[in-house]
Image (tube, rainbow, N blue to C red):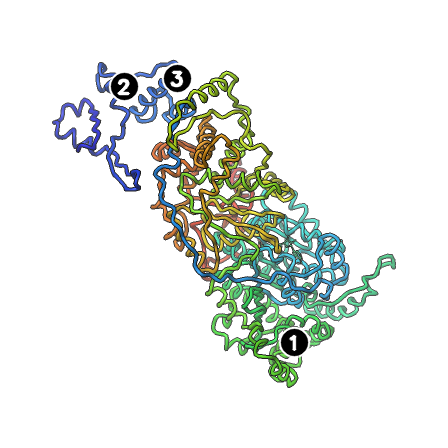
Amino acid sequence: MDDLQLNITSTIKNQNKTKKQTIQKNANEYKFKSKPDFSGKIIAFKRPQNAGQMNFSQKNSNEPPNKVPKLSNIAPSKPEDLQLRLRELSENKGKFHGKNYQDLSDDLQTKQKPRNGPWISSLFKNNPEVPKMGQKAVKPLFEKVFAGKTFADLNIHPHSVANLKQNLNLSEMMTVQQKSISIILQGRDVLIRSQTGSGKTLAYALPIVEGLQAIRPKINRNDGVKVIVVVPTRELAVQTYELFVKLTKPFIWIVPGLLSGGQKRKAEKARLRKGLSILVGTPGRINDHLLHTHSLNFAKTGCLVLDEADRLLDMGYEKDVAAIVKAIEDHKKAATYDPMALVKQNIKKPLENDEQQDIPNGDEKPVEHNVEHALTKIFQSTERQTILLSATLTKAVENLAGITMQDPVFVDTSDGKALVADSLKETSKHTDLKKIDTSSENIKISEKNIVQKVITEELNAKPDDIEEKQESRTGLKAFSGSNHPELFAGVKNKGQTNNSTVSVSGKKDNESDSDSDYEYFKVQKELEVKDPIVDKLDEAKTEHEKVEEPVANTFVEALKTAITEDELILPATVNQTFLIVPMKLRLVTLCALIVEHCVINRKGGKMIVFMATLEMVDYLSELIETVLTGKEDKAKKKNESEKKNSKANKRKSKDEDSDSEYEMDYEAPAEGGIVPHDLDVFSLHGSMPHENRIEVFKQFRVAKRGLLICTDVAARGLDVPRVDLVLQFCAPASATDYVHRVGRTGRAEQVGAAILFLLPSESEFVRHLEQKRIRLRQSDEMKALSVLQNIVPTAPTPQRAAIAVQARLEHTAHSSRDWLARASRAYTSWVRFYSTYPREVRMWLDARQLHLGHAAKAFALRETPGALARRAKSDPNVRKERPNNRLTIHDEDEKKRPGFLKVKPGIFGKRIVNKQSSMHTASEFDSGLPPVDTYTNKKRKNK
Ligand SMILES: Nc1ncnc2c1ncn2[C@@H]1O[C@H](COP(=O)(O)OP(=O)(O)OP(=O)(O)O)[C@@H](O)[C@H]1O
């Protein structure tokens, strides 16, 4: 019992009890705390809950013990007074005379004057040792980014080629574009995987525009939504929409539109009523309009694109995606089916395709080049093409592909993988894939005949057959996955099962005389097997050439292999490193890297820092900006005399300076920041007002240098030019998230760097990344700190410079109640976030390993974890509940729309829901609008 500081505060009742009873009761009230000693050993000691109370009780020993001491009415001005009142309040369980314990505690924190003279910093004390991880032999996967072919080589409208050159400055194709464009133009369902920044957006946007522009008569606004592009974030929606705007410049009759959260519903409704050809949006918002905007109809939609498909199926999005797919099918089904009209329409087609028909009054210029693509036919039919894209694949994507795609093609551009895996092909080791790639050129010849073929077929077909065709391609069968049992039943059955299904062009597979694109692949395959010339050519090839040739798997095999192997690809041009930084040094090391990259770097760096929660982004971005550039501090300047005093004290204390490395002069911050240059700091997270969010994104995009601090909301798809450093301040929730975050740099073969911050307890996370073929090198954390000597030239060592910067950070964080509240909110949010890491990574990112006291230092806080927890408890702005993934769709809403059937749960088969990591992106799943029924309810209540 020697190490117990007993504070026996007994009530009158207790006094009447026996001594033994009193001691037992009080012993139960003691808190047990553990913290490491200097050598890192954990020592436990017990401390009474009201430790400070003993002295107070002693001071007021004249008063009866049961009497509540009164607070003086005079506002406390001196820290000692505050201390006193704080003790009074703490004794009285938080509230007294309407005063709040926390308020007083904050007053104490903020009004406490910095001590002048020697100030012992604990920044470098008690830190765990930084392990040297070494490097495992990892052979990363690489991808050839550029294909060596130009857009002019494609069979697309010359205006498109010219537009790409003039407005986008693009002429050479990227590999993924070369592989995918021709396949998309054939109207095939495609699943595309290629590394971040490899040009996937253009790979689908260009053929879509090409397919649309070729429709004759030209489409107009009244023709309805032809293409739906679903992306996970608003910024990505804006970016994709802008690309479509650029691509459709030569074809002004194609109207792209944007539906992303945060804008006024009314304005969007008006736009939808006017008519859009290409609709780009976030799933929540599209669904919101599906429910509440009756002019939005997908009956004419011929193409559905799900960009960042794995993300869209993650965390609550999948319901919305399912609802969109279902809406397309329902709307198509609901559209009046008139076989005669269909026949007439098809008979007219060859005439319509005659270019002369295009000139209404002889005024309009004829389009010189009007190639027919199978995709154009799809836009004119009731069918639908589905395109899924991502740099990373998951089981959920595989499931979705099985459900929504028919006879899909898998395009994987990583080296050593199948470049094009066609579901209509059997596994063949030495298939010449170039045949598939050039098929669009060959198919031109055959496509001329497709129209005629379809007409003949449809004229001959019974209504039942036609219905079956439509359903198979676009109807409920496709949605429920019933048309794809073979996809996962085994590859060998694939061909047979397909034989009994209806092909893309509506042709039965066993009728092999068809010229359709579907048949083309079949015939092509037969040719590959039978053609003696091809055989001879194959024989003539050297063994070496054969080894280099990519292996063409069937779609299912290739996709399954890709998912099982789970190997991740990152641009070879990104230099990836990690820093193991002890908790207390994290913030100051971050500042050092920002200074190094954005300030000292003459070229002017552009950097993105990923944080775990929006509270962290809000607080740390402002703190860093304030401390480094002095942005806000100006309002709270010290007066001249204080400055003089501090300088005098500084001089004085210099003389008294001790030898300790960790002891330094405390200098009250002077005016302004500590870096000589301007530093533009941007912050971005999902809870920002929409306008700010888009504005920040746009500003950062055009900035030549600057720092963006953000959550994972910026991790997917965002294409910000010249970002040369990505820093992950908090470890990602998965290796996949790591890839997407890093992928914001090194885009389109640009050079970039990525740094991952890890705690000593998290160091084994590197091994997890190495297993996924990600190669990282360890950097020296002390070397990173040495940069700070540039901005604190008086500091003799990097440690001293770090202490000075940390002091500035802490001073700012404690300069007002607001700062303190935000700091502790950020701290609390991070602590809560940490325990939500998904199970797969929890063994490396274990919340039990955290030292919460040290963590406070990383938020420039000086309070103990207990005090911070109390503050969080009394802070109404701290999010108490876990963010849910509910969208603004309610059961009642779903019922409101006629013909809009409720999506059955589990329709996407096995749901892969990453609930744990919902903290940092939760707000993304909102459509950005209040639920409509709130308004309705209010109205009802008023009545
Ligand atoms: N053919 C091309 N030549 C040069 N640059 C290109 C080409 N095509 C696209 N780009 C550029 O490459 C960059 C990355 O393109 P994009 O955003 O489409 O990549 P992504 O593969 O979708 O990346 P992520 O997986 O991160 O979403 C963009 O800046 C784009 O302008």
Instruction: Inspect the image, locate mark 2, and give the three-letter code of the amino acid beneath it.
Output: Val
Q: Which residue is mark 1?
A: 520
Task: List x then y, in percent, for residue 192.
Answer: 58, 62
Q: Position of residue 488 (x, y in %)?
A: 48, 70
Residue receiving disc 2: 68
Label 3: which residue?
Answer: 78
Label 3 close to label 1 by CB (< 8 Å): no
Judging depth in this view, the residue of 918 and 581 nearest the camera is 581
Residue sitting nearer the eye, 4 or 41 = 41
Viewer can see residue 588: yes
Which label lies toward us, 3 or 1? 3
- Pick out the residue farthest to the right: 362
Q: Amino acid at mark 1?
A: Tyr
Q: Is residue 927 left or right of residue 156?
A: left
Cβ atoms under marks 3 and 2 closer than 8 Å: no
Q: Is residue 713 above or below residue 625?
A: below
**Amino acid of disc 3:** Lys
Tag 1, which secondary structure?
helix
